Image (cartoon, grey):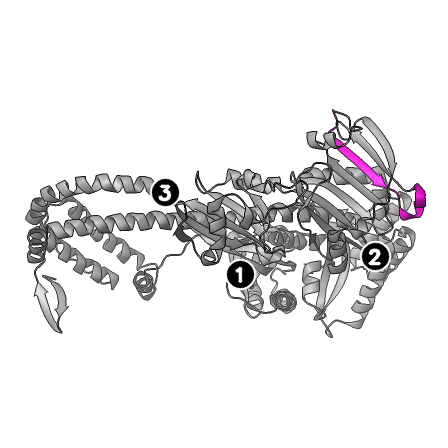
């Protein structure tokens, strides 16, 4: 390539690179220099503003997520307490219930008070005690750090009272206690009504805590027992935590971030002074009426900053960048975040530096022009040579060529690197098909690290008694036998749109709904598990006739939100999934051996598949590595394809476990024993019979929930 080509007035004109450079540096010395300086200045300013945009967007996203998570964390805590209260509401009428509330309060620092309120009027609360709360009641001891109280049920009538108690250390000696009459009806609170009517987490509007004077937001989660609403678990969260977060995570030194609702009421602010309403007892101030002019003007222009940052000059002559972002829909509150930052924090120093650089650049341009012209012709020939070479490499044409003769060290290094690249690509082509290598090179794309949250069904399987089987085989035989087994299981997975993520020894981790989205992926995973077991039955018949080892598989299934994508490091990663759903599926596969079944699924999966399959409720269990319990089920088969005798045994088993969960251990033991004796292969019935018999002899504590804690994987 001996010339640079350009089209002028429809005619192709060839201009030598040397002549072009000579004309540029001799004829247009001043103008190009000014153009470069102006362009560099504008590009640097644009880059700084783009960096501001990225920082603002990232900070806004983090702010929204962090603020929402602060509140949602409280929601998760009270949801757990609500589950406990649903199982045993009477438990919270004792002091032990206060212990549960105290532990829940400690789980999230943003919780100021947490309470359980029942429809019958009973109310138990545990709250923190600080200096402001002590000032609100002279009867609170100076050393008190914790407060616990309960209110009698409505049936107490005129004697209904609130019984308060204070502690320096929770669980220690009571510092003070007293009772006062009360007619408080928690059922009238807005977040109680919303939790009752919606059956889900309720987030109230900001209010003033009468004890401390601080702005708080109240949350409530319904307590539902046997399908009936019996009360709720509530919590008060101090909004100052969100303001502190905004203050500690400012975009720049002079920036301000505020959170407000759809009516323009200020919820939180990185500038704590903006939260002062100027009116005693007022909960919020309107953003449009606060003293800061810049914030007011930014608020008026917020509609221009919904999708990207908007830069404007305020009435005080400051250039400001603003950005608005809403809270996620799942938050169910019309809250928004507005960030206001002075562009001078980002480009002010850059402007001053550019002015200095302009003078220096002008001098250097004159000096370097002569040197560049001397080298231009030689560099042109070298560059053209390399362009041709790399174009050939881009087409995977790797023929030998003459080495470049150049005095420029970098070009010489580049030429040698090019030769090494050609050598490496020729070697790589012996391992990978040439067409594939060419496609990768021409595409110019690179896989990137990262993942996304997605609801998926996770499939775990392994071979029962594989250690014993492998002891009888040579390593080569193990490889052959495992290849046949994996091929069979792969067929059942691929036919149901499952993706094998990895082979783990004799185990398989498979994904449904990634990387390709799969409708009804829950059903597809169940079908794959059932079909895989059917194929193994047929395979065992052939293997037994041939005297080969027989393979029995155990399969665990769960569905839920996971993180899926390229996981690992920037230089080495694999496409896989991580999350609690993956862990639970793995544990369920391990529990198949304990209960003597082939396929085990979670309650979430059972619910997601509707009435497509026949399931057997096995137990309520807590698996290794998880603090929460879950109902576990045996996947028996598709609807209409399970033998009637198996369904009859299933129904009898579930009747027995109903007695077991209700504490009728003697009757449960008898029924489980009958099932076990009638069908010795029903290992789960035998296990439950022994467990029920043991509990009958030694009854559990009153708060027993029926959860069996597994200590082995």
Q: Residues within 10 Å of mark 3 (few under 14, many from 20)?
A: some
Image quarter in which the N terminus is found: bottom left
- In the image: residue 654, left or right of residue 634: right
Of badges 1 and 3, the one in the foreground is 3
Looking at the rendered structure, the secondary structure element under dot 1 is strand
Q: Earlier in the sequence, mark 2 or mark 3?
A: 3
Range covered by the magenta-colored residues: 143-159
Residue nearest the observer in this picture, 587 or 360? 360
Q: Residue at x 20, y 48 (%)?
A: 37
Residue nearest the observer in this picture, 306 or 540? 306
Looking at the rendered structure, the secondary structure element under dot 3 is helix
Q: Earlier in the sequence, mark 1 or mark 2?
A: 1
Q: Are marks 1 and 2 in contact (CB under 8 Å)?
A: no
Q: Are marks 1 and 3 in contact (CB under 8 Å)?
A: no
Q: Is residue 210 magenta?
A: no
Per the image, the residue denoted by label 3 is: 344
Per the image, the residue denoted by label 1 is: 500
């Amino acid at each position: 390539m001996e010339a640079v080509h350009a089209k002028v007035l429809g005619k192709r004109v060839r201009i030598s690179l040397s002549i072009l450079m000579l004309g540029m540096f001799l004829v247009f010395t001043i103008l190009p220099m000014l153009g470069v300086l102006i362009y560099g200045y504008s590009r640097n300013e644009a880059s700084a503003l783009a960096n501001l945009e990225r920082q603002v967007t990232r900070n806004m996203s983090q702010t929204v997520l962090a603020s929402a998570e602060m509140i949602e964390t409280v929601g998760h805590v009270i949801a757990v307490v609500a589950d406990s209260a649903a199982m045993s509401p009477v438990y919270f009428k004792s002091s032990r219930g206060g212990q549960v509330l105290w532990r829940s309060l400690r789980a999230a620092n943003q919780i100021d008070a947490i309470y359980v309120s029942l429809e019958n009027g009973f109310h138990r609360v545990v709250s923190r005690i600080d200096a402001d709360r002590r000032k609100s009641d002279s009867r609170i001891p100076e050393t008190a750090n914790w407060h616990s109280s309960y209110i009698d049920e409505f049936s107490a009538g005129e004697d209904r009272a609130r019984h308060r108690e204070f502690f320096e250390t929770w669980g220690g000696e009571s510092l003070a206690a007293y009772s006062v009459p009360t007619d408080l009806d928690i059922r009238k609170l807005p977040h109680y009504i919303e939790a009752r009517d919606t059956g889900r987490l309720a987030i109230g509007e900001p209010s003033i805590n009468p004890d401390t004077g601080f702005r708080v937001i109240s949350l409530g989660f319904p307590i539902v027992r046997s399908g009936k609403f019996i009360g709720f678990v509530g919590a008060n969260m101090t909004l100052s935590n969100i303001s502190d977060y905004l203050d500690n995570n400012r975009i720049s030194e002079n920036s301000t971030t505020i959170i407000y609702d759809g009516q323009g009421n200020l919820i939180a602010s990185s500038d704590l002074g903006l939260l002062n309403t100027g009116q005693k007892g007022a909960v919020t101030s309107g953003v449009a009426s606060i003293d800061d002019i810049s914030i007011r003007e930014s608020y008026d222009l917020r509609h221009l900053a919904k999708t990207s940052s908007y830069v404007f000059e305020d009435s005080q002559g400051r250039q400001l960048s603003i950005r608005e972002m809403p809270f996620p829909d799942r938050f169910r509150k019309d809250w928004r975040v507005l960030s206001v930052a002075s562009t001078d924090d980002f480009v002010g120093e850059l402007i001053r530096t550019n002015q200095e650089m302009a003078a220096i650049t002008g001098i250097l341009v004159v000096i370097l022009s002569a040197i560049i012209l001397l080298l231009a012709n030689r560099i042109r020939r070298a560059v053209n040579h390399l362009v041709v070479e790399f174009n050939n490499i881009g087409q995977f044409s790797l023929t030998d060529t003459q080495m470049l003769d150049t005095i420029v060290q970098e070009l010489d290094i580049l030429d040698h690197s090019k030769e090494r690249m050609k050598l490496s690509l020729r070697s790589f082509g012996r391992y990978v098909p040439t067409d594939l290598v060419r496609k990768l090179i021409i595409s110019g794309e690179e896989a990137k690290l990262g993942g996304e949250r997605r609801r998926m069904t996770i499939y775990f399987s392994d071979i029962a008694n594989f250690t014993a089987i492998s002891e009888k085989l040579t390593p080569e035989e193990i490889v052959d036998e495992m290849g046949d087994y994996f091929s069979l299981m792969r067929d059942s997975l691929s036919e149901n749109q499952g993706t094998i993520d990895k082979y783990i020894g004799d185990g398989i981790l498979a994904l449904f709904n990634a990387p390709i989205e799969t409708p009804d992926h829950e059903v597809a995973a169940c079908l794959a598990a059932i079909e895989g077991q059917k194929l193994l039955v047929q395979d065992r018949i052939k293997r037994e006739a041939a005297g080969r080892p027989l393979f029995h598989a155990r399969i665990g299934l769960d569905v839920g939100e996971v993180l899926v994508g390229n996981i690992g490091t920037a230089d080495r990663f694999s496409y896989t999934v991580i999350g609690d759903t993956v862990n639970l599926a793995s544990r369920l596969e391990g529990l198949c051996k304990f209960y003597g079944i082939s396929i085990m699924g979670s309650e979430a999966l059972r619910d997601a598949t509707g009435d497509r399959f026949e399931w057997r409720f096995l137990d309520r269990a807590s698996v290794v590595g998880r603090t929460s319990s879950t109902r576990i089920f045996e996947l028996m088969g598709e609807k209409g394809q399970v033998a009637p005798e198996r369904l009859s045994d299933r129904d009898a088993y579930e009747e027995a476990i109903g007695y077991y969960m209700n504490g009728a251990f003697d009757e449960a033991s008898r029924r489980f024993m009958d099932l076990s004796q009638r069908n010795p292969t029903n290992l789960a019935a035998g296990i439950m019979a022994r467990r029920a018999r043991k509990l009958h002899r030694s009854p559990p504590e009153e708060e027993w929930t029926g959860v069996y804690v597994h200590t082995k994987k």
